[in-house]
Amino acid sequence: MRYIRYASIAIFAVALILIALANREFVTVEMMPVEIARLAALTPAFDVPLFVVMFGGVLAGLVLGFIWEWIREAGERAAAARQTREIQRLRAEIKRLKGEKHQGKDDVLALLDGVG
């Protein structure tokens, strides 16, 4: 199983390298639309290889998706935490009630009653 994982990682790495080599020409990336940049008297633009733009877009999409999903599942995590606290409270109550039930009884009979 480990070899399959390493082979998959190697194939993925080779694919990324091939994509980067095929898309290494430089493109101009402008941070603002031209009209707004003229109004602000700022023209932030960078010349970067195309594969950097492509991989950056994929990475930004993954990060935004992870953040979106984390926010979406906040209610489910809170409900799970509430259920965990309730289970712990009920277990403590069961333990206390079992102790009260066997109070004043013979220890052997209490042990036998606890097994069944």
Image: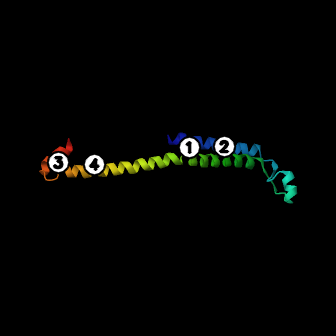
Label 1 to label 3, Cα distance in Å?
54 Å
Residue at 68 percent of width and 44 percent of height: 16
Tag 3 near tag 4, CB within 8 Å: no
Tag 1 near tag 2, CB within 8 Å: no
Q: Relative to 79, is 115 on the left or the right?
A: left
Quadrant of the frame with the C terminus = top left
Label 1 to label 4, Cα distance in Å?
49 Å
Work out whether residue 68 or residue 98 is closer to the camera in this orientation and state it.
98
- Counting residues from the N terminus, which is met first, the one under dot 2 or under dot 4? 2
The 10 Å Cα crowd at callout 3, few under 14, some 14 to 19, many 20 or more, is: few
- Circle 4 is placed at which residue position? 94
Question: SS class of the residue under badge 1?
Answer: helix
Tag 1 near tag 4, CB within 8 Å: no
- Looking at the rendered structure, the kind of residue marked 4 is Ile
- Looking at the rendered structure, the kind of residue marked 1 is Tyr
Q: Please provide percent x and percent y for residue 74.
A: 53, 48
- Circle 1 is placed at which residue position? 6
Label 2 to label 4, Cα distance in Å?
58 Å
- Circle 2 is placed at which residue position? 14
Residue at 66 percent of width and 43 percent of height: 14
Label 1 to label 2, Cα distance in Å?
12 Å
The 10 Å Cα crowd at callout 4, few under 14, some 14 to 19, many 20 or more, is: few
- Circle 3 is placed at which residue position? 111
- Counting residues from the N terminus, which is met first, the one under dot 1 or under dot 4? 1
The 10 Å Cα crowd at callout 1, few under 14, some 14 to 19, many 20 or more, is: few
Question: SS class of the residue under badge 4?
Answer: helix
